Amino acid sequence: MGVTLSRAVQWSSDGDQLENSPLNNDILTEILLFTEGFEDRHPQEASIPFCEPLQWNTSLEAADFTGESAVSLECDDKGRPLLQLSPPAITVHSFYHLSNLLKLSKDKKMKEVWACLEAAVNTEVDLLKRENRVLKSVHYTSDYVFSNGCRSPPWRQMEGEICSLIIETCDTEPTLFITCNTSGVFLNEVRKLSRCFFSIYFNAASKGSTRSQLRNKGLVKRNYCISHFQKNKCIYSSYVCVCMRSKSPGGADDFSESSSEDEEDEEKPERRAEILTDLPSEYWQIQKLVKYLKGANQTATVIVLCTLRDFNLVQEMCQLAIRDVGGLEVLINLLDTDDIRCKIGSLKILREISCNSLIRQAIADLGGLQTMVSILDTPVKELKCLAAETIANVAKFRRARRTVRQYGGIKRLVELLDCLPDSVSLSAEQERDADVARCGALALWSCSKSTRNKESIRRAGGIPLLARLLKSSQKNMLIPVVGTLQECASEKSYRIAIQTEGMIEDLVKNLSCDNQELQMHCASAIFKCAEDKHTRDLVRQYDGLKPLVMLLNKAENKQLLAATTGAIWKCSISLENVAKFQEYRALEILVGLLKDQPEEVLVNVVGALGECAQISENLATIRKSGGIQPLVKLLSGTNQALLVNVTRAVGACATDPENMPIIDRLDGVRLLWSLLKNPSPDVQASAAWAICPCIENAKDAGEMVRSFVGGLELIVNLLKSQNKDVLASVCAAIAKIAKDVENLAVISDHGVVPMLANLTNTVDDKLRRYLAEAIACCCMWGSNCVSFGEAGAVAPLVHYLHSKDPLVHQATARALFELSKDPNNCITMHENGVVKLLLIMIGSTDAILQEAAASCVANIRCLALANDKAKNG
C-alpha cells in the first residue's frame, strides 16, 4: 500500500508529508469513504485482525471516545487490544475499529486519514526489517531520500526507478539485489537454476519463515516456474515479500512446452520509463473511474464499465492507467460475478487492452485465463465470443498457452467450432453460432503455436471441424481457420489430415481471393504441406500453381511474398510442377526477386531456383535472366538456411558448361570452398556437393583447385566429420579432385587413404557409393592401392555388393577393379567371396558395372593362374 501511495499521491518538498493538492484530496476522500463504510458492507471481514496494526499520531484524545473506551475489550491472538490510545499514538488492528474510529472523529476524519497514510508509507519497509519474518533483513542501498520519496539517483528515476534493496530471505542462501521500478520489482542478480519456483507472499508482515506456517496464517501465494533466472527478470508488479526455493515440478507435461516458432516465443516484460509528469487528463479520469468501480453496486458498475469503453482503450496510456490503479484485478474479479452485464462489460474492456504485452502477462499472473476458460461453458453466446477473443489476445506467449491447455481450454474452444460454415441461408441464431465459431478459431490460432496444443486440438476432434469451416465464404471466418491450419501444418499428422479431409482444394481456391492476409495464410499452409509429393500433385491438379505465380507480383507485401515463394519452392520439387512454372514464366520473376528482399524471401526464392535448375533447359533461362551474379553474391552471406539453398543453386548452375566461366569469373568457386569452413554441417555438405560440378566443368580444374591456399588440406580434414551427408559430399568432391594427378599426390600426402579406409564399415548406401568412387580414383597414385589393402578397406568393400542400390554396385565394382591390381587385395577379395557376386554383375545391363566386374574377376583369375603355374613349375 505504501509504495502504491508513494507513486500516486503528491508529496511536499521535504518528502515527509502529503501535499495539500486537489489530487491528494480526491484520493484521501475515496479512501475515507471506503474505510468508513467497510464495516457495513463487509461485517465479517471487518472483524478480522490485521497481521500488523496501523499506528499513527492522532489528534484525538481520550475524551473524544464518548461511550467508548480508549482501549478495546477485544484482543488479537497475542493479547493485544485491537484498538489502543496512548497519546499521541493510536494503534488499530481491524477495519471494524478503524471504521468506528473515523465515525467518532467527525470533522477530524480527513486529518486522521492523512496522518495514518503518511505513517504507512514511511513504515512499510521497516515492517519487512523486523525479526522473525519471511525476510531476514531488508536494506536500502541509499539512505538519501529525494523530495519525491525516491532513493534512486535522478538519472535513474527518469527510467522509472524508485529505489534499490538488498534482501536476505529465511529459506534461501543467496542475497537478493532488487530494483524497485514503476513497472515492477526486478531481480538484478544472475543465477541459473534448472527449475525453481517463486513463491510470492502478499502479506509481507506475517510472522514465520516456513511454508506451513505461512499457509496456516492464510497468506495468499502464487507460484511461478521458470527455466532460467535472468538479469532484471520481473518478479511482480507490486512490492511483495519474495521467497525462492528449488522444487521439482509435479509433472513434465505441466511445465514443458515446445513451439513452432523459435522459442522465443516467451514474451519478455518490457521495462518502460513511466514518468508521472505531463500525463493526459484521460489518465487521471480513467484511474478515478476504476476507483469508483471498486466500491460500486451492480448498476453503477455497468455504468462505469460503459464509461470506460468510451475512452480510446487501444492507446497505451489508457491501458496503463487501468493497470496502475489495480483495475485489472477488479475487471477479472467481475468475471466471477453472476451479473451477465458486468461480465460482458469487463470482457469488452479486457479484450481491448490485452493487445498490450504488459497487460497480457498481468492477466495471466492474476489468473484471468482460468476464469475466461470457464466462461466458455456459459450458454450466453456473447460471453463465449468475448472470452474466446480475449483468450486469443492473451495467449500470445508460452505460459498463457500452457495455462489454457491445462485448464481444459483447448477442448472447450474446439467445441465452439461446431456450426454450419456458410451464412447464406442461416437463421439469426445460426449466425450467432458462426460468430462463436469464428472467435473459437481465433483463440485456437493463438494457442496452436505450441506443439502440445496442436496435439490437443487434434485429439479434441478439431481437424474435421476446421475442414468444415474452411468451406465458408466469410473472410473473417476463413482467416483464423486457415491461420490455425498453417500453424498446425508443421506437424506430419496435420499434413496428412489436410490431404485426406480435402482441404487442399479449398486452400488453392482461396489463393485467388481478394484478401491478402487470407492469401498469405493459404500459401503458407501449402508451403508446409507441399513437403509431401501427393500434396504437390494435388496443388497442380486443382490449378494452384498459376495463382501462386500471380501472387509473386504483389512483392510489396513481404509476408505474402515469403509464403508464396515458399509454396513455389516446395511445389517445384516435383518435375511436373517445374514444367508448369516454365510455362507460366515463373523463373524470370524469381530471378528478379534475388535483389533487395528480406532473407526470409531470399531463402525461398533461391530454394525454388535450385529445384528448377535440376532441369537443364532452365539453366540457360537463369543465365539469360541475369541470375548467376546475384546467386554468387549471396554466397558471402551468413544466413545458414540461405547458404544451403544458394550453394545448391550455384552447384546446379555449374552443371552447364556455359554457366561455369561466369561463376569462375565472379570468384564463385573460391566462395564455395570457403564455406567448407562454415560451422554448419548442412552448409559444409551443400558447398561440397556444389564444388563437384565446378571441378568437373572448369577449364583448368586442377590449377584452379591448387590455387586455393590450404583448400586441399581443408577438404581432406572434413573426412573426420561425424555427419554422413558431409562425408558423402566430401568423398564425391575428392573423387573429382583426384582426377588431377598433382592434386591426387597432394591429398595423398595429407593422409586421404587411411581416412577413407576408416569410413568403409559404414552401412549408409549414399556414403558407400561416393566413398567407393573416391577410393577408385585415389588408387591411381603411387602405392595407394597397396595402402588401402593394408588399412583394411578391401573386405568391407566386398560387402557393399550386397546392397540393393545399383549405383553402389557400380562404384564398388570400379573400386574393387582398381584394388585388384595388387595381389594381396585379390587374395582378400577371394577370401570374402567376391567372385560369385561379381559373376552375377557381369550379366548386368549397366555397361560400366559389367566392365568393372569383369575386369576385377580377370585380375583375380590371372593371379590364380600365375599361382598355379608357379606351383606346377
Image (cartoon, grey):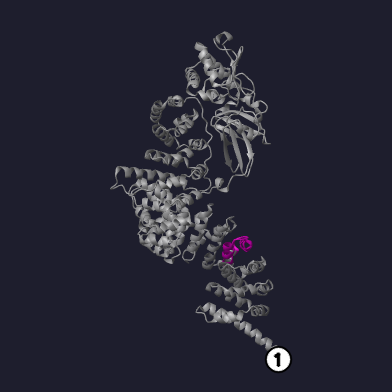
Residue 806 place in picture, x, y as percent: 53, 74
* Left or right of residue 329, residue 523 in this image: left
Looking at the rendered image, the quarter that the C terminus falls into is bottom right
Q: Tell me, yes or no, whether the highlighted magenta stretch contains residue 744.
A: no
341 relative position to 683: left or right = left
Residue 707 painted magenta: yes
Q: Is residue 443 above or below residue 185?
A: below
Q: Quadrant of the N terminus?
A: top right
Q: Which residues are magenta?
A: 706-732
Q: Nearer the viewer, residue 76 or 155?
A: 76
The secondary element bearing badge 1 is classed as helix
Q: Residue furthest front?
A: 73
Q: Is residue 282 above or below residue 544?
A: above
- Label 1 Cα neighbours within 10 Å, binned few <14 / some 14-19 / many ≥20: few
- Most common secondary structure along the magenta stretch: helix
* Figure quadrant of residue 751: bottom right
Whether residue 601 appears in this view of the structure is no
Q: How far across and how far down the image is residue 546, in percent? A: 35, 58
* Residue closest to the far bottom: 873
What residue appears at the point 59 percent right and 55 percent down from the top-left corner?
A: 679
Q: Nearer the viewer, residue 753 or 315?
A: 315
Would you name the residue on which mark 1 appears? 872
Residue 110 percent across, percent down from the top left? 51, 15
Q: Is 799 located above or below residue 134 in the figure?
A: below
Q: Can I make out residue 792 in this image? A: yes
Mark 1: which amino acid? Answer: Asn
